[in-house]
Every structure is written in C-alpha cells, then in structure tokens.
Image (cartoon, rainbow, N blue to C red):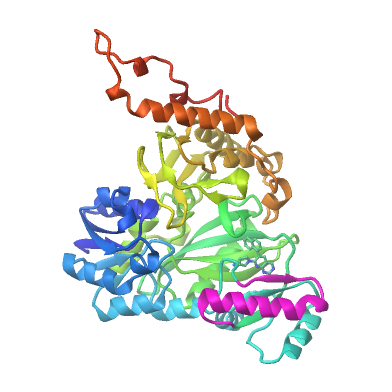
Amino acid sequence: MFGKILIANRGEIAVRVIKACREMGIATVAVFSEADRTSLHVQLADEAVLLGPPPALESYLHMDRIIQAAHRTRAEAIHPGYGFLAENSAFARLCEKEKIVFIGPKAKALELVGDKVRARQAMEQAGIPIIPGMKSIPKAMSDYQQAARGLGYPVIVKASAGGGGKGMRIVAGEPDLEAAIEAGRREAKSAFGDESVYLEKYLEDPRHVEFQVLADNHGRLVHLFERECSIQRRHQKLVEETPSPALDADLRAKMGETAKKVMVAADYNNAGTVEFLLDKDRNFYFLEVNARLQVEHPVTELVTGVDLVRQQILAAAGESLALRQDELRQRGHAIECRIYAEDAARGFLPSPGKILVLKEPGGPGVRLDSGVYEGWDVPIFYDPILAKLIVWAENREEACRRMIVALQDYVILGIHTTIEFLGDIVRHPDFRAGRTNTGFIGKHFADWDGGGKDQERLRLALAAAAFDDMDRSARPKDAAGRSAADAWPRPWQSIGRWRIGGS
Ligand code: MV4
C-alpha cells in the first residue's frame, strides 16, 4: 500500500480524500493556491505545498508544479478528486512517465470516454443502446441536414469533446439548424479547443440516471447501483438520490449489467460512472462515462456501505476487488443536497466572502462533507461548492423529512448559499412524490425569490448582528467579566423560526 498520497484538489473533496487516507494509515500532501492558504484541506493534511497564484491554470491545473510537489514530498500516488485534472489523459500519462500512480483510470480509457463520438461508436459495437444520432463528424452542412431529417426534429447539437452541456443546442426545425451548428462549434472550440459537433435525436425532459462502477486492474468489476440526478439547473446538479424512484428491480438489473458492459468495452479500471438518459417509456440510452469520483458519490456509500475513495486507492495500488456483485445490496434511501456559495434568488450569482456564522447539522443518518469553517473567506476563483449535506433513512419519505430538518439546522450567515432553495425543492409535492426529471427546476423554480425582500432584510440584519458579535472580546466588561454581547438569546445564533420553512 502507498505510504503517502498527494491530493491534487481543494475544498470538500480534498477533505474527503484526506479522511480516507487517514483511516488507511496513509500520509497526505495537500496542494494549494495563494487564495487557499487558510483553507480547510491545507489544515487537515500532513503536509502542504504552495502551487502558485489563485487562477487554476497557475495552480490546480498546473501539471508540472503538481508533479514537482509530489516528487519533493515523495508522494507515491496522486488523487485528482473531481474537476481540475481528474479526467485529463495527458496528466494521467505524465504521472505514469514520472512513476507516480494516478488514482483513476488509464490514460487510454480516459481518451476513449472523453471523445463522445468515439465512445458512441465503441458502445454501439458492444451492443449498448445509444441515443439515435450521428456516429461520426461530417464535413458538410448538407450532411447535418440529411441526418436531422432522418432523425426527425427536435434534434440536439453536441460537442464531441464535450460533456456537461457545453456546446449543446436544441434545434426545433431545419431553419434553425445551421446557426445552432455554428454556435455549437464556436462554443466547443473555445471550451475544448475542438470544434467537432454532431447531432442526436432530442429526448424531451428525460431522467438522468447513472450507475456507479468499480473495477480493479485485474478485470474484476461490480456496479454499485444507480443515482438519480435529475434535479439540475443549467447542468449543475443540486439534489441527487439513490435508489431512483424511476427504477424497479428489473430495470435496475438490466441497466446495471449494461453499465458493466460499457466499462468492459472501454477497458476501464478504478471508479467510474455510466450516465444514462431514461425516457418516459422507460427506455434507457447510454449518454457518457464520467471517469472520476463524482461529487454525488456519498449517496452510493450510504446505501451500499462501501467507501468509494478507499476502493479507488486499493484498486490503484493493484489490489484485487474484494466486493462481489451478489453480495452488494441497496439498503434504505439516501439524498444529497449541494450547498453552493451562490445567491439562488438572483440567478445563482456567485457569493464569495467571509462566513460569519456557521452552524452545522448532525445526528443519526446525517453526513456533512464540508470544506469550510466559521471565519473563513470563500474565495471567488473556483467552483462555488461549499459542502454536501447527505442524509440516510430507511425509506424515501423518512429521508426527505430528515433532509428538511437538517437543512433547517444548517445556518450560514455572511454569504448567500443554496440552503433555503434546496429546502423548498425537497418540500415540493412533486419532489416528495418522486416526480422528477431534468425539467423540474425550470418548471417549478424558474423565478424563485427566496421569500422576497422581508426575508432578505432579516438575513442582512442577522448577518450584521453576527458581524458585530464577532468582536465581543473587545467590549467593555461588567464586574463579573461579562460583556453585553454575552447576553442570551442572540437570534443570529439560533435556528428555526426566522428561517424560510423553519419550524
Ligand atoms: C441530451 C438530452 C436530450 N436528448 N441528449 C446534458 C448534459 C450532457 N451530458 C447531455 N445532456 C443532455 N443530453 C439528447 N439526445 C438532454 C440533456 C440534458 C440533461 C441531461 C442530463 C442531466 C440534465 C440535463 C439537463 C438538460 C438537458
């Protein structure tokens, strides 16, 4: 087993990986940018190496500096987390050349699944259902027109190098096709440096259901069931859960076996996720492979009891997978809510700044994967995820109730977060009934205003009071040594009544 691992990431996922390493007796190296000197992951690791200035290209995306940090600290392996270099085949290759183990799939598998058109070809050959559409990149506009007529409108333009919605355009009819292809090309070119786009039949409001897979380096693999990820806004997931309310045992078994076939066809190793779209008639189609540990991995951990990060590390060290498909079970129900530093009432504007008050939920079946602490300044430079709140309960309804209470117990003042927005999602009758699809947020929450001006004034007043309270040691004290700020109750330290949807 490795003696020391470098974590090439920041925030909650770096903290999550450090935790797994500590449990395994593995020393940890954090890397950080100048904007992250005081970050939690830096404080929790055994060692930390400064990479450079705040911009990701100068720090968390700077391959040479990360490799150098690994050499200097004698780390034997690098865990990339998600985002940044996690699915970068050039980085996986560089690690190999430098004799550092990349904790993830081989560069060749990363290349295949990173190329959507090649992946579609490979999956079709393996007998996997793919969304009807093109299987190569054509030259002429007339080829696109012909393909679109054959598929029938609406169609969707997708970038071959893409993923996550960049370069995508929905086209209602032939008059809009050329402009959509041009726009998709430009966006793909600037996002991925590759302007290749292709067409698929557009599926209306599908569900997004993905399967977790674990594979070792010796050809053994299992799936760990599904995650339902339909609650998204502009391709940013907000709520995930497992089991999916849309699957029965039969469909689950079919999709799970298909997910394993996908990974065999991709010659895939380590942890990965196979994404499917599920239409209203319960047809499922391969969408793409996410070649990384995903943000939403904890819901799978809570219902299967498997520590996915530990499994990633074991597999990367060359150990044989000790899990057997026929021994894996889904027990109970898990839901995850993503806490972003964003103002949900104002178009999800980023909301960096100092966390003045932080009160965290806990209790039975409540897990918080967090990368923040009270008094810390949330920097503006990176993905705004602060934490993930994950709950487990025996069934979906109990899990919803547990989530609602945990969100009520979660107080962050000083910056805007998605906490209140998430509470309204989980309380929504359609969510409660499991009636979710990728159109849910657009349909029910397009103009959510967080309770309006009154709620906003209250939050501001509480934040101001909390700010005032921070400096209480400087206040004049009475004979007993108490300052005025020690008076109780202090409303900004309380939970409940003043909050939207509070008790
Ligand atoms: C689609 C689709 C409908 N039809 N493809 C969005 C992200 C990218 N990975 C693929 N996506 C979609 N592809 C066809 N042929 C609808 C989406 C889509 C979506 C997919 C998964 C989760 C959320 C989504 C939100 C909007 C659109």
Q: Give the residue displayed 55% in from the left and 57% down from the top.
A: 226
Q: Position of residue 363 (x, y in %)?
A: 42, 32
From the top left corner, tell me how far across and down residue 474 is, in percent: 28, 24
User: In which quadrant is the N terminus drawn?
Assistant: bottom left
Left or right: residue 188 versus residue 5 is right
Looking at the rendered structure, the number of numbered marks drawn on it comes to 0
Tell me if 326 is positioned left or right of 458 in this view. Answer: left
**Residue at 37% across, 52% down:** 11
Name the magenta segment's main secondary structure.
helix
Quarter of the render that holds ligand 1: bottom right
Q: Nearer the viewer, residue 101 or 386?
A: 386
| The C terminus, quarter of image | top right
Q: Is residue 191 magenta?
A: yes
Q: Which residues are magenta?
A: 167-195
Q: Is residue 253 magenta?
A: no
Percent position of residue 284, x then y: 66, 66
Name of the residue lying farthest toward the top: 479
Residue 384 percent location from the top left of the image: 47, 52
**Residue 320 in view in this figure:** no
Q: Is residue 187 above or below residue 424?
A: below
Is 335 in front, or is 116?
A: 116
Q: Locate residue 155 relative to residue 469 in the image: left or right.
A: right
- Which residue is found at the position 62% from the left and 43% from the top? 345
Whether residue 341 is situated above or below residue 137 in the rendered picture: above
